[in-house]
Image: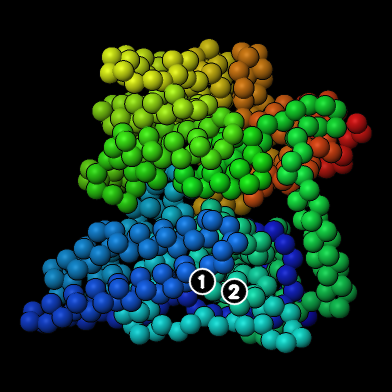
Amino acid sequence: MSLWLSGIGVSRGIAIGRVHRIHATDLDIPEYEIAADALDAEVQRFEEGLARTREQLETIRDQVPANAPPEIAAFIETHLLMLEDSALSDTVAKLIREHHCNAEWALKLQQDHLVSVFDQMDDAYLRTRRDDVVHVTARLQRVLLKEERHIEARREANREPPVIVADDLTPADIIILHQQGVGAFISEHGGPLSHSAILARSLRIPAVVGMHAARRLLLDDETVVVDGEAGHVLAAPDAEAIEFYRHRQKRDQRYRRMLGKLKGEPAVTADGVPIRLLANVELPDDSADAAEVGADGIGLYRTEFLYMNREDMPTEEEQLAAYRRVLRSVDGPVTIRTLDLGADKTLGQGRDPAQSTNPALGLRAIRLCLKETDMFRVQLRALLRASAEGDVRVMLPMISNTQELKQTRHLIGETMNQLRAEGHAFNSALPVGAMIEVPAAALSAPLLARHADFFSLGTNDLIQYTLAMDRVDDEINYLYDPLHPAVLRLIKLTIEAGEQAPIPVSMCGEMASDRRYTRLLLGLGLTEFSMHPASILEVKQLIMQSNVAALREQVDAMLACSDADEFREHLDALDEPAPA
C-alpha cells in the first residue's frame, strides 16, 4: 500500500530508488567524572580528536572534483574554520578542567550553548547556521567515541541510485554520498537555508528536509519516489506511479539542457520589457558563480560573515579587500548590505543574548549600527573607498522610519569629509538604499523613497513580520505564506512607491528565486530580481515567456478580489503564459 509523506522540499528534481537509512548526528553522549590527575590526559585526548577530525575534513575537501561548483569546497572550509575557532577548541578544554568531565560531555555542553545563541538570532538565514555547529560537533563526537564509520551507500549494478534517509546530514556527508552516486536525500531535521540544503541544490540532488519520523516510517530497501520541489515522498509506489515519475525525470533532463542555452541571452519579456537579474552572495569568492550564469550584478552581498567567529572587529583594510574581490569578479552594480547583526550576536564584545527579550525585534541591523557608530564608521569608510573602484550600492537593513535614513546619510557625509581630508578617493554620489522587510517600511514607502536611492524587498523577514510567525519553527511554519493577500499588497505598495519616486525596486528574498512566483512578481511590477546564482537561468526562461502588460492587468484584478476562492483562481491563471 502506497504512503505519502511530506516535508520541506529544498532541492528540485525527481528520484526513484530504494531506502538506505543512516544515523549521522543522534549520538548517545556519555557523562562521567575525570580525576584531577587525569585532566591533562583528557584534554590531550580531546585535542587529538580535533586533529583527527581536521584530517578527515581535509581529505574530503581534497576529493572534491576540480569541476565542482566552488561553494562545495567552501562548505568544508567553513567547518574546518569552526574546528579552529577558540569557541570550540579552547572553551571545551576549559570546560573539561573546570567541571572535571569527559571530553564528549564538555563538547556537548559547548554545543548546546552555541546552538542556543544561534537559535536566538533574528535573521532566519543566520539562525540556520546552528546546523553547522551540530554537524561539526557530531563529526568530532564520532571521533571521540570511536564511531568513525564511513557512510556507505554505493549504487548496486542494475538498480536505481539509493535514497538516503537520515536524522540530519552534514555537507561533508553529502559530498561523500554524492561521489557514491546516491539519488536523493531525506532528513528528519534541517531547513531550506542550511548549508546542506544549499549544497544539495548546487549538486542538483533532489532533497526533502524536516520530514519528522522518516527513519521510523520508511524501511530499508523500500522503493520510494522523492519529489524535491514539492517536498513529497511516495513510499511503495505502484507501477503506474513509477511510470509517471520516470516521465517527469526525462522532462526535467530536457529542461536543464535547454536552460544552459540561455546564459548569453538578455532577460527581456515577450512584450519587450527588460528585466535585471542579480545574484545574492555570502562570501567574496561566491561572486564567481554569479558571473558564470551571466548575472547582471550583485543584488545582495551579506557582510555580517566578516564579523562572525572572531573575537575582534574586522579592520577597514580587511573589509575593503573583501569588497574589492567582489567588484573585480562581476560586471554591473554590487549592492552591499551593511552589518545585519543584533543584540543576539556577541560581535566579540561579550553581549549576552538574554539582554534582549526578543532579539528579532530588538537592537539589530541598522539600529545597532546607529548606536555603535564607531564600528559602523569603519564599515562606511571601507564601503566608500571601494566605491572608487566600481559600481557600489549600499543597502541598509531593517529600516523602519525616515530618521534612520537621515542619520545614516549624516554619518556617510561625515565619513566622506574624513576620507577627503585624508586623500582617499570615493564616489560622492554613492547610492544608499533601504531594505523593505518591516511592514511599517512598506506602508510608509512613499515617505522613505524621498530619502532613499533604491529599495530592496527582503521578503523572508517581511513575510514573517507581517504574519507574526517564525518560518524556522517546525510547529508553525505552515503559516509561512508568500501568497497571503496582505504580503502581496505590501509588495505592491513598495513597488508603486518606487515607480512614483522614481527609484529602482528590487527583491532579494527567496520569493525572487522561486519560479512559482516569477509571473506574479512581474505582474506586481517588479523589474529587478536578486537570487542565488543557481536560480537565475530558470527565472530568466520564465521571464522571456511572459507578457508584463497582460500580467499586470491580471494581478490588479486578483488583488481587487474579496473572495478567497476567486483570488486563488486568478492566481492559478498566472501560470499560463500570456500571449505576446
Residue 32 or residue 140, whichever sits in front: 140
Residue at which label 1 appears: 63
Image point 30% across, 40% down: which residue?
314
**Extreme-right residue of the structure:** 579
Relative image position of residue 558 (x, y in whole percent): 79, 31
Question: What's the residue at 87%, 73% (across, down)?
Answer: 243
Residue 23 visible:
yes
Going by the numbered disc 1, the residue's amino acid type is Gln
Looking at the image, which residue is at 72% across and 87% down?
A: 157
Q: Position of residue 471 (x, y in %)?
A: 54, 49
From mark 1 to mark 2, how far is it between C-alphas?
9 Å
Graded by Cα atoms within 10 Å as few (under 14), some (14 to 19) or many (20 or more), the crowding at tag 2 reads few
Question: In the rendered structure, are the residues bearing label 1 and label 2 in contact, judged by CB atoms less than 8 Å apart?
Answer: yes
Give the quadrant of residue 100: bottom left
Mark with earlier residue (1, 2): 1
Specify whether 25 is left or right of 562: left
Q: Secondary structure at mark 1?
A: loop
Mark linked to residue 179: 2
